[in-house]
Image (cartoon, grey):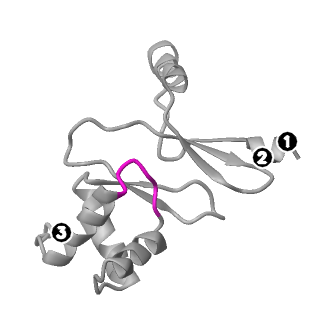
Amino acid sequence: MTKTHYKTKQLDQLIDILKEHSGKHMTANDIYQQCKNHGIQIGVTTIYRRLETLIEQGVVAKYVVDHTTSACYEYVGDGHEKVITYHCKCEKCGKLYHVQCKEIDGLRLHMLNHHHFEIDLSRTVFYGLCETCRNR
């Protein structure tokens, strides 16, 4: 039995919020706050349900970095070209950085082409120290 997903005004509003922040990772609470700022009446539970629908449809990507950070969501469009984003986490302050870098993408392609290993970008995190923590 397949689930039927209905397009609703609320879902359209959620997509608009995600599009507005295209290229950024947002937690469900970030999305909730943005909805609130735009006067959109929607609960956090409903946001999670709608996000799951959008993930299934390939409109939103979900990133889970570790067990101490909330999952992040990013609008990736309706199947057009996806932007590859890498995750870097500072081991000292805990800040999560989202990086788009052709050099790192070269490593991903090297692993695939030469070692026949495909990296799962939604779960890959580089750990180290951010510039602020290194300079302290």
Asked if 98 appears above or below 34 in the picture, the reply is above
Badge 1 amino acid: Asn
Asked if 90 appears above or below 11 in the picture, the reply is above
**Which residue is pictured at 32% across the width and 60% down the height?**
18
In this rendering, does residue 102 appear at all?
Answer: yes
Q: Position of residue 98 (x, y in %)?
A: 54, 45
What kind of element bears circle 3? Answer: helix
Badge 3 amino acid: Asp
Mark 3 / mark 1, whichever is N-terminal: 3
Provide the residue designation for mark 1. 135
The reply to whether dot 3 and dot 2 touch (C-beta < 8 Å) is no
Provide the residue designation for mark 3. 12
Out of 99 and 106, give the one closest to the viewer. Answer: 99
Name the quarter where the N terminus is drawn.
bottom left
Residue 132 badge: 2
Left or right of 104? Residue 41 is: left
**Which residue is pictured at 81% across the width and 47% down the height?**
133
Badge 2 amino acid: Thr
Magenta residues, as a range? 21-26
Out of 66 and 27, give the one closest to the viewer. Answer: 27
- Magenta stretch: residue 6 in it? no
What kind of element bears circle 2? Answer: helix
Left or right of 94? Residue 52 is: left
The reply to whether dot 2 and dot 1 touch (C-beta < 8 Å) is yes
- Quadrant of residue 11 in the image? bottom left
- Magenta stretch: residue 23 in it? yes
- Quadrant of residue 69 in the image? bottom right
Left or right of 92? Residue 36 is: left
From this viewpoint, which residue is outermost toward the right? 136
- Quadrant of residue 4 in the image? bottom left
